Amino acid sequence: MIPEIGEFALIIALLLSVVLAVVPMYGATTANEMWMSYARPLAMGQFLFVIVSFICLGYAFAQDDFSVVYVAQHSNSQMPIQFKLSAIWGGHEGSLLLWALILCGWTFAVSRFSKALPLDMLARVLSVMGIIATGFISFLLITSSPFERYLPRFPADGADLNPLLQDFGLIVHPPMLYMGYVGFSVAFAFAIAALLSGRMDAAWARWSRPWTNVAWAFLGLGITLGSWWAYYELGWGGWWFWDPVENASLMPWLVGTALVHSLAVTEKRGVFKSWTLLLAIFAFSLSLLGTFLVRSGVLTSVHAFASDPERGFFILMLLAITMGGSLTLYAFKAPSVKSESSFSWLSREVLLLVNNVFLTVMAVTVLLGTLYPLLIDALGQGKISVGPPYFNAVFVPIMGTMAIAMGVSVAVRWRETSTETVLKTLWLPAVISLLMGLIFPFVYGSGFDMRVFLGISVSLWIISTVVSEFIGKFRNAQTLSSRLSQLSMSYYGMMLAHIGVAVTAIGITLVSTYSEERDMRMAKGDSVELAGYQFTFQGTQVVKGANYMADQATIEVTEDGQSVVTLHPEKRRYNVKRNMMTEADIDAGLFRDLYVALGEPLNEGEAWAVRVHYKPYVRWLWLGGILMALGGLLTAADKRYRKSSRKQESVHA
Amino acid sequence: MPRLLLFIPLVLFIILAGFLWKGLSIDPRELPSALLNKPFPEFSLAALQQPERILTKQDFMGQPVLVNVWATWCPSCRQEHAQLLTIAQTNSIPVIGLNYKDDRSAAMVWLQQLGNPYQFNIFDEAGMLGLDLGVYGAPETYLLDAQGIIRYRHVGVITEQVWQDLQNMIKGWGSVNE
């Protein structure tokens, strides 16, 4: 009965979203205030019913209702409860329901926190989001209902969730990622509403900025979590694979980063309006494209969902309607007039434009690399795959150049800055970062290394310019605390995010240069030395988990005779599907990770293939990601968005 | 002129959408069997239910058959079992089981509990015949013609839809032969 209630709630949510898509929009075009005011209650109702539906699916999982096909395929009675619940989004249907839930959640949030928005704007924004919800909920109901039943004969137990997914990572990674993906729908809806109403002014940029920053922060956090998960779960210590699905999340993040900056220019200076609108459309379209690539089965990937051309066709239609429609609207309504605002070549405007160009080029690079196999296949030229060498060759130089521009940008003001001022602020950071970059490989490594020199210099350049700019703010300050509180939240957020980029860059540089690893055949008592650490294999024992049996090894790690840690990597065999899983054990540290994974048993369990890694600074990768996300959240918390919108309201009233 | 520039994104998108559309009809996972239109490999293995009986290719030559690769460790096999029983009941084509890398007693219990759609079962405990066939995993199903030539390979669960397609394929041969 409960699954039927879930399905029914979803149908009601669909009906509400259809009304939301039509009525407030029509009200806004005909200036009918009553029709417009339906937007808020409809947004709330839609959210409520999707919540009900989601809870019903969760209940089916918790109660092991294996008459529900989706539950039977993705769960098992032996699974621990937290994995039963996160298995809700462990497959195509349920993750799509999560998508819909988050979309309706964002819609509801916009309706709640935009009290200051003019009613017609709000009505249009919510209607656009209603259109998107209509598309996705009907996609769910027509092709991918998670509530379908095996009747009358249903399996006695479930087929179990893929062991790779039975992990903390599944609990947090998809929801964060979807918060980001779907969050860009808000920026998209604002852009469409602006195009429809013809009000593409600074106010529009100010309204959509906090939403965009929050979505961007979540997406960054989601990607970071995904990278961390892959690192410890896949068992070979990699943290980025240039897999099509990773790329699908990276593309909207890159365009989103460009959008976050471009919105700043549009808000403060009223320029680049058309460009900003286009980025807002693209950020969300790339999220949709990612959804299409993952779920249609057109590309092979480790993330592959059960592929189904019918579903692929449906998402392609959604994509065609959303993107085709919005780009047509854009072509006809976007302002083509050159803005009259003036700025010189050395100004923040220009540097932000440079940032936008770089980020867009990177996004296009990733897009081409991801779709190239598909294009070649579609042209009948055979099956190929594009690997990391292509991405690294293109990505690294662009990232490096952009990092240099990042340092300059913090020292430059709006409109115009004299070359002299810029040089005066920047010479010291430049000298410091170059020197440190030069010294670092000698101190840390065994000698000069070009990659380390460039990577460290560029990262320190970003940090030192931010710091020197920050200190510069205090030169004329009366007291420290008065000055600290004068600086806005968005200023702090910007600094934090930029430092995050540098921290990630340091992590990437060092982990890809100084990592060491060895594959060894180890029997009881054998030991191996790696990067000054002694790893001694003490044998294995059998341990029993909730739904698996495992061979657990004990490996003592010592450094100069001092005990460091004892690691317990496992080789698990899950009871239901009988898949083998490698569970690495990691001693994590700020400056290095020791990572041990078990391979195959050799000589009937006498010895094991063991892989040991030494990963310096690998944590910095994710630390930087977290700093960037925190920065994004801080900017959105800026007082000015609340204050200025209140002012806006009094003008309209 | 500037207005025309604003149409560029739309045009680019239309081109992209065209490719994606084309991409839908291509399956990157489609692994054409190396043995397609080639004879089924020779083998000599025990039958599942009668260990003393040795089966060879000659046991099913002379008529079109379906060879279904299955195992008790494969949950999808359980899923397609009902469909196999339906096929067996229609008596239109014999279904031969290839019990792949499995445990004999577990497989017998499985057939007792779920019903037996197979005319007989080849017991491929070591997976050698599966290796010769190029089996990726269970379930897989091969359609053989009367000469024992592999005409079609289906990877994954046999659904109602797949069965329809197989029937059409077999009907197609009938009309050619007549």
Image (cartoon, coloured by chain):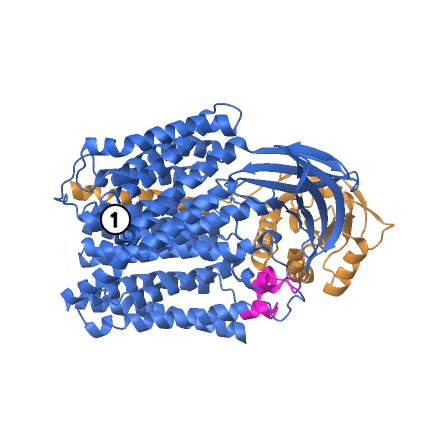
Chain colours: A blue, B orange
Q: Which residues are magenta?
A: A59-84
Residue A487 pos. (x, y %): 27, 51
Mark 1 crowdedness (10 Å alpha carbons): few <14, some 14-19, many ≥20? some
Q: Tell me residue A462's x, y (percent).
A: 35, 37
Quadrant in which the N terminus of chain A is drawn: bottom right
Local SS, label 1:
helix
Q: Is residue B122 left or right of residue A416?
A: right
Q: Residue at x 75, y 55 (%)?
A: B119
Closer-to-camera residue (B67/A279):
A279
Q: Position of residue A108 (x, y in %)?
A: 35, 67
Quick check: is A498 in the magenta stretch? no
Determine which quarter of the picture holds residue A188.
Answer: bottom left
The residue pinned by badge 1 equals A264
In-front residue for pair B163/A387: A387
Amino acid tagged 1 = Ala
Magenta stretch holds residue A78: yes
For the residue pair A204 and A434, the one nearer the viewer reads as: A434
Q: Residue furthest front?
A: A479
Is A351 placed left or right of A89 in the picture?
left
**Percent position (x, y) of residue A418?**
18, 34
